[in-house]
Amino acid sequence: VVIQVPGTSLKLLGTQTQPRMTAHDVVCLHTMVGYLKSTDAYFRDQGFGGTESHLGLGGKWGSDVEPQLDGKTWQWQDVAFTADANYEGNGRVISYETADNAPQDPDDIAEWTPKQLDEIVRVVKWLCSREAHKYCPTSWKCYKEGIPTSLIPNTLKSSRGIGYHAQGTASSMPAGAERWSSTVGKPCPTSRRIKQLKEIIIPRVRDEEDNMGFTADDKNYLGYIVGAITGANNNSTIDDVQPALRDGLNAAKEGRDTTKKVYTGVEELAADFEAFKVSTDAKLNEIIDLVSPTEDSTDA
Ligand SMILES: [Zn+2]
Ligand SMILES: [Zn+2]
């Protein structure tokens, strides 16, 4: 059985020649300085004899545009076998390359797109789950615990969790830490994406709630709802607003995992819009602030 991440396209690079993994300790994010299409061609050229990562994510740039690969993941290597993207960590690191705008200067690597963020969260969440490791040797930690959904502090062999390539390329690292590249100082996946990994992806993978009890997915979902409500004028009736609420509800349901809590809230809201308008203005304002913290209030 090939261990494949659900929802990805399996595109093995050829006959299997790589050794088996000896552990699943880390999911590591990379950036390609290129596109999924071009990186696929580059990896495929030498099959498993050359460089490769386990997974690759498409973007909205270059040769990924026409085949609409933004947010699509291709799987090049069976997760049970090693890939060659993390040097001394290859035996225990699952590697995930991501497409970018391929600039001359790594400082100009663009942020991950919303579709890329959603897909990274989905894929990393699965890789960290116990489900992903049910075929692993029963003596392995991943079989018993999955992979922790926190950022690893360093690349010591004892570190397990979510990481990024540059953690293993720094000029100064703890004694015994794995070098994840033969090139010292490789900044992959570069500053904007490292920030997104820490501030957006890991909290979403962990389903962390803010102090109002909303997860990141709740907030996205509430964004649809608030848009529907604030888009309607004050004299709207439930019949005017309900279609927009329904559209938002359906879009949100199709697009992401939503929590029962929020789903139920919108069902009630849609059923009693007039009551909602009168009784929960303050709560609505809180939600608007929450989902659009940088929005200027230009109302008179
Ligand atoms: Zn890298
Ligand atoms: Zn495993």
Image (tube, rainbow, N blue to C red):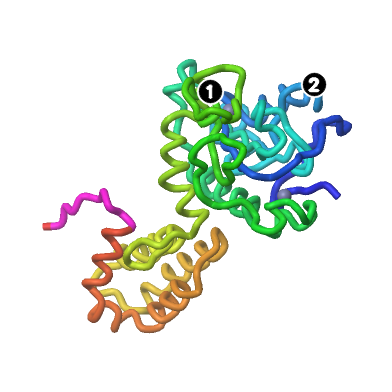
Residue type beneath disc 2 = Gln
Q: Which label belongs to residue 46? A: 2
Q: Dividing the picture into quarters, in which one does residue 64 lie?
A: top right
| Residue placed furthest toward the right | 15
Q: How far apart, in angstroms, are the residues tagged by discs 2 and 1?
A: 22 Å
Counting from the top left corner in percent of width and height, residue 59 is at 57, 36
| Residue placed furthest toward the front | 175
Give the residues drawn in magenta, as a range: 291-299
Query: Disc 1 designates what residue?
Result: 102
Counting from the top left corner in percent of width and height, residue 130 is at 67, 59
Residue 295 included in the magenta stretch of the image? yes
Residue type beneath disc 1 = Ala
Report the predominant secondary structure element of the magenta stretch.
Answer: loop
Residue 164 included in the magenta stretch of the image? no
Position of the C terminus, as image quadrant, is bottom left
Q: Quick one: SS at disc 2?
A: loop
Tell me if label 2 and label 1 are in contact, CB under 8 Å: no
Counting from the top left corner in percent of width and height, residue 73 is at 66, 42
- Residue visible at 50% across and 44% down in the picture: 151
Density class for disc 1 (Cα within 10 Å; few <14, some 14-19, many ≥20) is some
Density class for disc 2 (Cα within 10 Å; few <14, some 14-19, many ≥20) is few
Counting from the top left corner in percent of width and height, residue 57 is at 62, 38
Mark 2 sits near ligand 1, with its Cβ under 8 Å away = no
Q: Is residue 258 left or right of residue 72?
A: left
- Residue visible at 47% across and 42% down in the picture: 197
